[in-house]
Amino acid sequence: MKKFITASGEPPVLHRNSANLMQNMLDEVKANITILPEFKSLIPPLQVTEYEQLKSNILKDGCREPLLIWQTSRGVIDGTDDGSPLNILIDGHNRHEICVEKGLDFKITLRDFPTLQSVRDFMIDNQLGRRNLTPEQMSYLRGLKYRNERQSAGRPVQDTTSADQELSESTIAQRTQDRLAKEFGVSPRTIHRDREYSEGLDKLTPELKQNILKGKQKLPKELIQSVGRTLPTDAPPLSLDDVLTFQETATLPIVTPTKPAAKSDEPKKAVREIAKRAVALNPSSPTFQQDCDDLIALLKAVKTTI
């Protein structure tokens, strides 16, 4: 199958007798849509009621909004020289699922992107522009956007030392964080926490991640951020049981064994002195009042050492 859009992204000028050819090519694209799990994971899942409402609308009025398709080759996806064409769905996953399940027709719009990363950026921005996102979904997408942009801007420069590179990456990270904070009207610290949250979610099993974003599974946000901070990127995905085990381990206080402090003999000596002075008290003595004051002061001093 050949692509039938020009380099500028505009459709070619077709004669009337080309209409059937155009329709046949569109039908071929629709019959061979590829869904990448990575791209599907960028689409925040709908709540059950939202999904049922979407299905009801499509059954009643048809799929009115076109699905967005990226025409590319397999080699672009897997980094090989494979030129086999692929028609990858980048927007409309829920609509496509419903239409396929119910045997309904749908429209498509073709888009051209230069790189895999540019598709990711487009999809994240496209989702962030929607109004029905939950706070968890918004936090995840903001953190993902920060990670993608920081990675794109922070590619290592070969002619710099490791110290200079580390400083450069730190500067880029801070600038990216500040810019996104201004763009979304939040604090830079929030963007930093969003990054940890998105990293933590990406270290969970796909099912658990989707359940959290759907609101079906509740876990403390701080716990997911801790997963993101602590576990390496190549760690096996965590199930719910794994996360709960991680929580128990992470919340245990770190106790450093210490030797008991040596007990001082000073309090004992003071008590013996107090007893000695108490026995020696003489109401008839001209220094009786002063002796009482001294004894009281000594008792207070001993009290602070016990």
Image: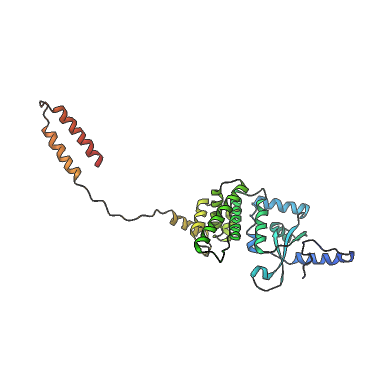
Coloration of the structure image: rainbow
Outermost bottom residue? 81
Q: What count of labels does the image hold? A: 0
Question: At which x and y percent is residue 45?
Answer: 64, 55
Q: Which image quarter: residue 198?
A: bottom right
Depth check, front residue: 112 or 68: 112
User: Residue 195: x percent and y percent?
Assistant: 55, 54
Image x and y of residue 236, in percent: 52, 64
For residue 11, above or below residue 263: below
Rendering quarter of residue 255: bottom left
- Residue 192's place in the image compared with 103, above or below, is above
At horizontal 21% and vertical 34% (from top left) the residue drawn is: 297
Question: Relative to 258, does residue 71 appear above or below in the rendering?
Answer: below
> Which residue lies at the image location 89% right of the left edge and 64% below the top edge?
16
Q: Quarter-wise, where is residue 248 in the image?
A: bottom left
**Farthest front residue in view:** 159
The image quadrant where one finds the C terminus is top left
Can residue 28 be seen in the rendering of this structure? yes
- Residue 306 can be seen, yes or no: no
Give the side of residue 236 with respect to residue 85, left or right: left
Residue at point 50%, 51% (across, down)? 222
Furthest residue toward right: 16
**Quadrant of the drawing holding the N terminus:** bottom right
| Nearer-the-camera pick, 175 or 20 | 175
The residue closer to the viewer here, 247 or 146, is 146
Residue 295 location (% of width, % of height):
18, 33
